[in-house]
Amino acid sequence: MHKLILLLLFALKIFSAEDIVYATVNGKRLMATLYKADSKTKSPCVVLLHEGGFRRGSRECFVDIGNDLALRGISALSVSYRLVQEGGAYPEAVKDCIEAVYWLMKNGSKYNIDTSRIGVWGNSAGAYLAVMVSIAGGLPEDIKKGHGQFKFDKPRVKAVISSLGFYDWEKSKFRGDGFIKVNSHYAEASPIRYAESSDADYFLIAAGNDEFFSTDQAKSFSAAVKANGRQVELNIKQWQKHAGICDMTGEFAQWVIPLSVDFLTRKLLRGAK
């Protein structure tokens, strides 16, 4: 029924979807899909970063969520970053995601998007990448500039959703499945090291029964961000296991997505602090 409604709304042109190339790296075109509401005023935009352990997944994970956000007046840019087997091992996938935000900052006005109201939303591996984008101002110079196509000094991000993300590689059971290739990078690639570099507010979702990431990581990152004067909403479900949100009918998605959309509405659409 949900997909039938979306098809009907496409026919009525209440929102639109457009595939774009946000960068070209070593001859490979990096793609994203922009879900844009038909609005007379500038809309905020959320960059969506898919799950999949750095080896699986694509931007198609967020078709339903992207459409749903557009219907609510929040544009969405769903990004396909390079996977490990495609050359996306650290720091390349991080640079891809940073570049996607830079593309949005550069081209937002063309799509009637307010680039002062950008959010980033990811789950699992996508959550890690979302947080890395948000603290990019503190990353090594060759990473925070993305692929160098746009001359920005850091991504302009106002709100971040990190569901089942991780913040310290050195304290994670999951070691990246090839994402980290140099042992010294486990420390360098850990968001906890750069928490003071963020200008965003966060909604962090953690699972007490997560087989990969301890809730202590989310608590530590939350405390570090709060110490820097930013707002953090931390939601821990002790019974929850590690799960995905691509299937909107799944048990995890059923309670995470409404809370996440509410956070984005408050932070980006209504402009609440």
Image (cartoon, rainbow, N blue to C red):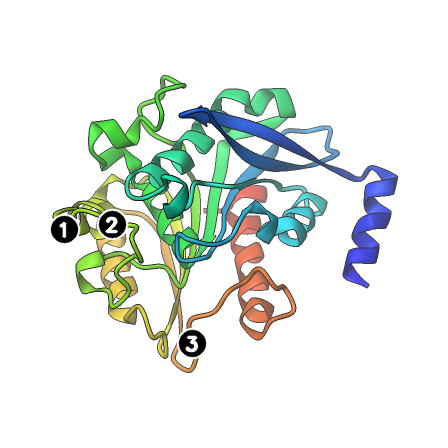
SS class of the residue under badge 1?
loop
- Amino acid type at image mark 2: Ile
Q: Quadrant of residue 75?
A: top right
Badge 1 local density, few (<14 within 10 Å), some, or many (20+)?
few
Q: Distance from label 1 to label 3 (Cα)? A: 28 Å
Q: Where is residue 69 in the image (x, y as percent from the top left)?
A: 64, 48
SS class of the residue under badge 2?
loop
Badge 2 local density, few (<14 within 10 Å), some, or many (20+)?
some
Q: Distance from label 2 to label 3 (Cα)? A: 24 Å
Kindly identify the residue that appears in the image at 29 percent across and 31 percent down. Answer: 144
Compared with 256, 114 (above or below) is above
- Residue linked to disc 1: 183
Judging depth in this view, the residue of 87 and 244 nearest the camera is 87
Q: Position of residue 94 (x, y in %)?
A: 34, 40
Q: In which quarter of the image is residue 12?
A: top right
Q: Does the CB distance between marks 1 and 2 fall below 8 Å?
A: yes
- Residue linked to disc 3: 241
Compared with 107, 15 (above or below) is below
- Residue linked to disc 2: 180
